[in-house]
Amino acid sequence: MNKIKNLYVNCKVRFNHGKGYIIAVLPSGKVIPIIDLHMRLLEYISQESFRDKICCYINDIEPGIDPNKVIDIMIDNGIIVESEASYQWPGMTYGASLIDKEEEDAVLNVIRSRKLFRHENISVDGYKYQPKCFINDFEERIKKMLDIPHFLAVSSGTCALDALLDAFDITYGDEVIIPSFAYIGIVSILIKRGIVPVICDIDEFLMLSSADVEKKFSAKTKAIICMHYRGRAAQIHSLAEIAKKNKIILIEDCAQAIGTSLNGKMLGTFGDAGYFSFHQHKLITCGEGGGICIKNSDIYKKLQLITDASRLFAHRDILPGIPGSNYRMSELHAALGCCQLDRLDGIVSKLMELYEIFVSELEGLEKIRLLPLQPKEYGGVQSLCLQVKDRVIREKLVEYTRELGIDTVALYTKDSYHHDIYLNWAYAIEKIGLVDSWVNDRDRLHEIYPRTLEILSHTITIPLGIGVSKQSAYQLACDIKAFHNNLEG
């Protein structure tokens, strides 16, 4: 009997800023323009892999065309692939995938209470707090977990960074050191404020290079922002030493790294401040949300005012105060977050178990290296980072693992688009003055941080998720090892 083959998405969809249309970026880096029908199909195929159902979907949205012909064209162009999946590999499954009746009941309880905000009212005598408040509970629990004096819940990780720049008086014309591979929101906030981003290369661990940081200081440097990538720690000890020696502020971007520790100390607590994200795709989620951990009590008080414009009267001792925004978290979001905190240890433990399987099986390979953790590092590793000897092996490994049904990504190819790479920070690149026109001079950008691009071009990532079984992890590790052993030369 013939085995049933299913359809799988084999590309990333991007908006081509230079040409102004939507493109499919294949694992090889090849770029193909796509039409609206193909976009809608890619979204549907990512949820439903059976060819018959996909044909029915095409008939529903575009009656009168041959659905099999549409599918075959997409297969011929490599936009989708047809194969029998070897694995059940639900990567990128974290806290949001665990939401159940506990979260539903907590949110419903807030709605039924009609108290959706932390405070009952505000007067010149300060705040009147709700007797029971999810936000207070959320903050206290994270503060205890991080072992730090202050934690403030806010509406997003990006708002958290924006507030920290205010709190540390980092302002127009100041310089802030950032990595060349980081969330685009970091550079966006700096540019918006007129702060000058000083971009540094990454190191072999895909995070801010302390060696390059030491070369990029100037009299205008006010801070370093380092990002901890996908649950793994940056070289935070050396970065903290540099910041302390030069008397500048160190801010840790822990958006992807809640629950990760190094030598028993939690990320976010090595520098002057750390900020977190509780977005839908993070290890634990509030739907949307963020938080700031801080050691200095005076800075914490400033942050309270900055993130809540009406909080001024709670601190009459510092009137007339400072301007504030409304970056507050709601009780609805915090109720979800409190339930998710109960799940964090289990999520981190499962991801570490999966990662250790690959450490055990891939150790000692000559041409494929699993990016290691630091000694005594423990956390929710969300991606396997495999660094290969050359780009030929990279392309073969990406193709091989994708045929197994794994959503493998090459971090950088010449024609690919990845919004975490400095190449694609279009408005920032022009504003900083690295090029006059991002569209016309983009090729010249490849020459500015060649070490970053060289490291990324030799790295592929495979998403880990708590839905992945240990058996599947072991099977994939063995297959990668077999692939390595079959390489010529």
Image (cartoon, rainbow, N blue to C red):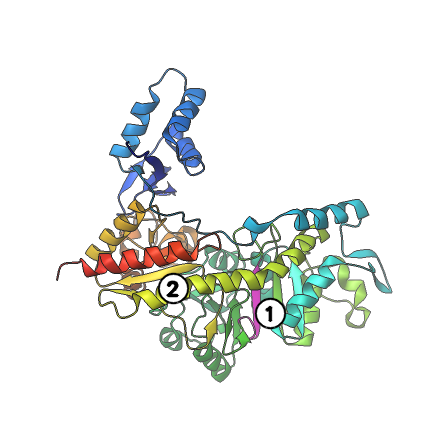
Instruction: Name the image quarter holding the C terminus.
Output: bottom left
Q: Is residue 375 visible?
A: yes
Q: In the image, is residue 328 above or below residue 41?
A: below
Amino acid type, label 1 = Asp
Estimate the x, y position of residue 235 in percent, counting from the top left.
Answer: 42, 74
Q: What residue appears at the point 52 percent right and 63 percent down from the top-left corner?
A: 348
Mark 1 lies on a secondary structure that is: loop
Residue to which mark 2 is pinned: 357
Left or right: where 23 falls relative to 197: left
Estimate the x, y position of residue 397 in percent, counting from the top left.
Answer: 26, 54
Instruction: Name the image quarter holding the N terminus.
Output: top left
The mark tally for this picture is 2
Mark 2 lies on a secondary structure that is: helix
Amino acid type, label 2 = Ile
| Residue at the left extreme of this rendering | 489
Left or right: where 198 falls relative to 482: right
Estimate the x, y position of residue 475 in percent, counting from the top left.
Answer: 34, 55
Give the camera-side residue of 326 and 270: 270
Which mark, residue 453? none
Residue to which mark 1 is pinned: 169
User: Residue 3 in magenta?
Assistant: no
Left or right: where 312 falls relative to 83: right
Is label 1 or label 2 in front? 2
Q: Which residues are magenta?
A: 267-277
Q: In the image, is residue 388 above or below residue 28?
A: below
Q: Give the alpha-carbon distance from disc 1 to disc 2, as whole Å.
A: 46 Å
Give the camera-side residue of 81 and 279: 81
| Residue at the front extreme of this rendering | 1
